[in-house]
Image (tube, rainbow, N blue to C red):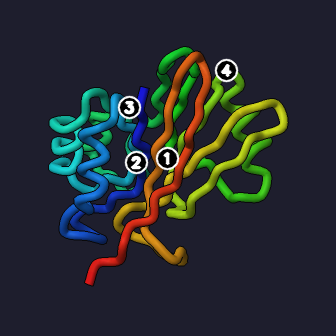
Amino acid sequence: MRLLLTSDTHVPARARRLPAELLDSMSRADVVIHAGDWIDAATLDLFESRSARLLAVYGNNDGPELRSRLPEVALAELGGVRFGVVHETGPAHGRERRCEKRFRDLDVLVFGHSHIPWDTTAQEGLRLLNPGSPTDRRRQPDCTYMTARVAGGKLSEVELHRLQRRR
């Protein structure tokens, strides 16, 4: 099972459109995971129309229309791996411990908000992934998203993709 992980798309506030590479990767994914901050319902509509399956949440910048269509936390078992998606996890310091306590029954937690890519495994085994943002790099050198695979009840091939800067 091929996964695409993204967050903080911020269209049209930070970008007029999504990068072509992200859209191409979306069409090859079995499941697309979006960890919130869409800003605009048209972007959610685009993801829904192009994704074989979408697992998504709203973020702190998403208004009433998006909040009425998306949960704050999404949970799903994908290929035997228990996933959770949430936008915010609080400060980096202590994140693993906090998330492991809050999401005891998960194998993987995908989150966003900071626009900073993150890939760690907490002490008791919870994998935490933040794909960054494909449109707003903030203090990062590049805009990013992630892909991964699930097979045989295991997450593998987690890859951070760096997007070329627009000119």
> Disc number at residue 103?
none
**In the figure, is residue 6 to the left or right of 129?**
left
Residue annotated with mark 4: 105
Amino acid type at mark 4:
Asp
| Residue nearest the viewer, comparing 50 with 37 | 50
* Discs 3/2, front: 3
What is the spatial separation of the Cα atoms under label 3 and label 2, in whole angstroms? 10 Å
Helix, strand or loop for disc 1: loop
Residues packed near mark 1 inside 10 Å, few (<14), some (14 to 19) or many (20 plus): many
**In the figure, is residue 110 to the left or right of 100?**
left
Residue annotated with mark 2: 36
Residue annotated with mark 1: 87
| Residue nearest the viewer, comparing 154 with 41 | 154
| Residue nearest the viewer, comparing 136 with 155 | 155
Amino acid type at mark 3:
Leu
Q: Residue 76: image x %, image y %?
A: 47, 21
How many numbered marks does the figure carry?
4
What is the spatial separation of the Cα atoms under label 1 and label 4, in whole angstroms? 18 Å
Earlier in the chain: of badge 4 and badge 3, it is: 3
Helix, strand or loop for disc 2: loop
What is the spatial separation of the Cα atoms under label 1 and label 2, in whole angstroms? 5 Å
Residues packed near mark 3 inside 10 Å, few (<14), some (14 to 19) or many (20 plus): many
What is the spatial separation of the Cα atoms under label 4 and label 2, in whole angstroms? 21 Å
Residue at the location (61% across, 32% down)?
108
| Placement of 153 over or under 133, stated as above or below | above
Earlier in the chain: of badge 4 and badge 2, it is: 2
> Disc number at residue 55?
3
Residue at the location (56% across, 63% down)?
116
> Mark 1 and 2 residues: CB-CB less than 8 Å, in contact?
yes
Q: Residue 38: image x %, image y %?
A: 31, 53
